Amino acid sequence: MSGYRVVADTGLCQGHQLCQGEAPDVFGFDRDADVVVVLVENPDESRRADVAAAVKYCPAFALSIEED
């Protein structure tokens, strides 16, 4: 199994917070800045499906997964 890294482009984030619904232990939200916060940059492999769903459903395309 290869590892992966979660990347958030806060310049693209529009504050929809859908990522938190998919993976609340990986994504947080900065209410002051109105942007996503990555709480766990290198989540466990068991979280990959939820993280991938967060990336897929982000309406601003602000999230990505980078393979190690």
Image (spheres, rainbow, N blue to C red):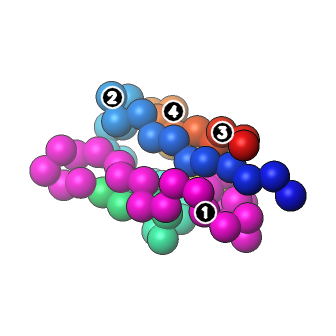
Q: Residue furthest top?
A: 11
Report the residue marked by disc 2: 11
Q: Residues within 10 Å of mark 2 (few under 14, many from 20)?
A: few
Amino acid at dot 2: Gly
Q: CA distance from mark 4 to mark 3?
A: 14 Å
Q: Earlier in the sequence, mark 4 or mark 3?
A: 4
What residue would you read off at disc 3? 66
First of labels 2, 3 by sequence position: 2
Residue most toward the right?
1
Q: Are marks 3 and 1 in contact (CB under 8 Å)?
A: no
36 in magenta? yes
Q: Position of residue 31 (x, y in %)?
A: 18, 55
Q: Nearer the viewer, mark 4 or mark 3?
A: 3
Q: Is residue 13 visible?
A: yes
Query: Closer to the camera, 68 or 50?
Result: 68
- Mark 4, Cα crowd under 10 Å, few <14 / some 14-19 / many 20+, is some
C-alpha separation, residue under disc 2 versus residue under disc 3: 18 Å
Q: What amino acid is at disc 4?
A: Phe
- State the separation of the CA atoms marked 2 and 4: 11 Å
Which of the pair 17/68 is nearer the observer?
68
- Give the labeled residue for mark 4: 61
The numbered dot on residue 43 is 1
- Counting residues from the start of the chain, the first of labels 1 and 2 encountered is 2
Earlier residue among tags 1 and 4:
1
Element class at badge 2: loop
